[in-house]
Structures are given as C-alpha cells and as structure tokens.
Amino acid sequence: MRRIPASLNAQFNTLLVKNKIPQKYQIHYLKWLRYYLDFCHKYGLSESSPQSLPNFIRKLKEKRQTEAQQKQANKAIHIYYELIRSKPSNKKSGLTKHLRKPEGIDDASYRAKLQTGSSKRDSAQNKPIQTVAKDNWDEAYRQLSNEIKFRHYSPKTLKSYSTWVRKIQYFSKSKDPELLSTTDVKDFLTFLAVKRKVSASSQNQAFNALLFFFRHILNREFGKIDGVVRAKIKRYIPVVLSREEIDAIVGNLKYPYDLVVKLLYGCGLRLFECLNLRIQSFNFDFSILTVHDGKGKKDRTVPLPQVIMPDIKEHLEKVRELHDKDLDGGYAGAFMFDLIEKKYKNCAIEFVWQWFFPAKTLTFVPETNEYRRYHLHERHVQKAIKRAVNKAKICKRATAHTFRHSFASHLLQANYDIRTIQELLGHSDVRTTMIYTHTIKSQTKKEAKSPLDF
C-alpha cells in the first residue's frame, strides 16, 4: 500500500476541515484517498483524472463495500480533485508522470516529442497514449467476460482468470494487450515462481488463464515458452474424519448449519452444490436427491440418508413458512439462473424453485427496485464449521470439503466398489476417485475374506 506524502496529507486534512468534514470521519477520508492512489498506481491510471474514479468505485463495489462507504469514498476523491485543481502545476506534472514511452521509440526521440507535445496524442486515434492502452484493456476484460459466459464457465473461473490477467497487466506496466508477447508471459511466470513463491496449483492456474487470454481474446497462439517448466502438482492425500469426529462436529453446530453438514457428509456433496439446492431437488417418494449443475455443469442423483429425513422435513416446513411470509410482504422471488424467468413467468415465487437453505435476509436489487432472496452464504457455513471443529477439539485440518472426502472413504471402507463411488461423487475419471484408496487401511491377501464367510 502506497503511503501519502506528509505534505499531501497536511493539505488534504486542511481541505477536509474547509469542507466541514467531522473530525471522527477524517481518518476514513484519508483511508479512501490512500486506497485510490494505490488503485491508480496498480492499474496504471491517472490519479488526477476524474475518469479513474468510476473504475475505483466499481472496484469498491466488487469488494462488497456498502453504498454508504462508496459515497464516502466518492466524496473523498472529489475533495482530492479540488486540491489538484488549486495547483495548476499539478496538471503538467501529472500528465508527464502517467504518460509512458511507446514501444519502439528511443529515449532521445521520446523526450523531443514530449517537449513539442506531439507525444501527448496518438496520431491514429487522437487520444492520449495511456488512454488508448486503457481502452484496449477495458475492451479485453469485456471480451474475456463474454467468452467465459458464452462457454458457461462458472463465475469463479471468470474471477480467477480476470485476476491473473490484471496481474500481468500490472506486471507489464499496463502495456497495450496487443503488444504482450511470450517473453512477458515467461517473465511473469518466473516472477510468480521465484519471487512470489506461489504454489504449483496457482502457477498452473495462471498459465491456463493466460493461455485462454491469448487464444480467445488476443486471437493468437500462445507459442512455446522455453525456460519455464509447468509446476508439477504433488499428490494430495485428503483429510478424513472418523464417524465419531463427524458426530462431535455436528453436535457443536447450530441450526441450520448442522443440517448442511449432514447433507455434505450423508450425500457426498460439494459446498456450493449443497447451498444451490432448491426444493424441487428432493424426491421424498424414492428418497433421492438430484444435484443439478454440479462441477462441470453435470447432474447426478444420490440417495438421501434415512436417518435425517425427519430433520429435512422439519426444515422444509420452516422454509415454507418463511416463503409465505415473504409473499405477504411483496417479495419478488428467489434469484434465478440464466433466462429461466422468461420461460417460466412465475417460477421465482413458486415454492418448488425456492432455495432449500435460504439466506436469513432479503437482498435489495437496485436495478429493478425489488427484494429477492439468495441462499446461505458459503462463508457463513465455513466459519460455523471452523468454530465447531475448534469446540470439538479435533486435531485435523477439517473444512466443508472434508465431509465429502469422509463420505467417499467410509463407503470404500464398507467395500463399495470404486465405480459406484465415482458415480456418487460425480467424477468424470475414475483416477480422481482412486485417491481415496490411500485414505483407508490397506488389506493384504491374507486378511481378505472369502465371499462364503460374508
């Protein structure tokens, strides 16, 4: 994080007093200025240009800052602009500070052009060179978002790929994306491995993100990158809990988090699969749970544990009561996916489309001026599990995904065949499921029993 120079700090504080900002809020205004300066430096934007402010506010929104915080940050930066306007010399120094030398021009020629003012404008676009590069990056991010959504990749894929592209933009000092080369990628990957010491999985994720960016956004092949070896991911042995440990964790969980964990372990679900369940996912006649749009956009069915059926039905009644209360209050419905609401007009308010684990509060949608309900936030579940693990004094690194590992290992220990476990977990390749053979005690041929003894 960049520090604010002492002189700027004093001038900004003076202007805060002049604008009648209460003293208890002045430290927050200073914080927003520091964040703004760091943001502009990170993404190669002009600190003195009002065009940088919408991007900064958008970033705050992505970081889930409240509307009040966004307004406060907006006011703080406008006060900073007022400070800049009071100093005419800042305009000239700010321009030369943020204007970068174009590729292929030697330093002497660039200085000559800067003195005449011709380097301030790009001859083709009649725009500042830095603005042209920024516009190209903005267009690249828009195309990246469109390409990932077109392929129906998950929002997490979009987030991770965008993050790595922003990092190489910052690493290359916001060089125009069309000028990026395999040398830039090689230097960036080497920097990640040597300087940042990132894990093998992070290094490979960065490689895949940049490969996608080159092929589908820049429309050119990645090329061979000599000297950079893709990190080999070591085989990870999953953490597995015993049945006693699982019961101890569930005993330390409050409603509805205890039911979430029972489904994670009882059905072998991933956390996002469990939280994305809707009422129609449950088939009580055949005791089957249908998982829609699991990892890889695949559907599968798993048996419902009979021992928790009373808990599930009791929870279902509470969800029904909450839904009726929402309808009486003018509720607009649950958040839906894709364009399903255009196909089924009233699906958002129909009970079968409601979340099985609804959020405790409604979410206001400013675009449509209505309230909708989302499912439980995964962070709330993760924090509840962590607290329960600590209370149970379990000396294992247990997370929400540990219950899925335990589900597979316990089935394997009960002599279920590996292909059945593969289907229940939704794995595309049986080799992924084979990892669980390392989590249970091995049996020698002498220890194995004959089928006649079963």
Image (cartoon, rainbow, N blue to C red):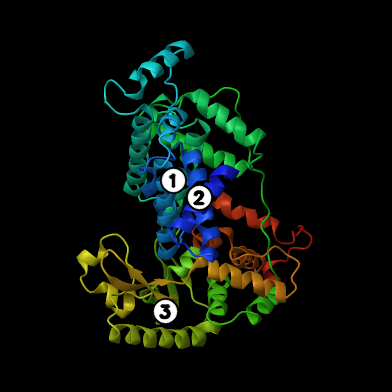
List the residue tagged with mark 1.
83
| Mark 2–mark 1 distance (CA, rounded to whole Å) | 7 Å
Tell me the tag on residue 286: 3
- Identify which residue is drawn at 57% across, 51% down: 432
Front position among marks 1 and 3 = 1
The residue tagged with tag 2: helix, strand or loop?
helix
Q: What amino acid is labelled 3 in the image?
A: Phe
Decide if residue 65 is on the left or right side of residue 249: left
- The vertical placement of 213 against 451, above or below, is above
- Identify which residue is drawn at 64% across, 57% down: 436
Decide if residue 72 is on the left or right side of residue 439: left
How far from the left and from the top, in percent, is residue 268?
54, 67
Observer-nearest of 121 and 389 = 121
Q: Mark 1 vs mark 3: which is more N-terminal?
A: 1
- The vertical placement of 405 against 162, above or below, is below
How far from the left and from the top, in percent, is residue 374?
39, 71
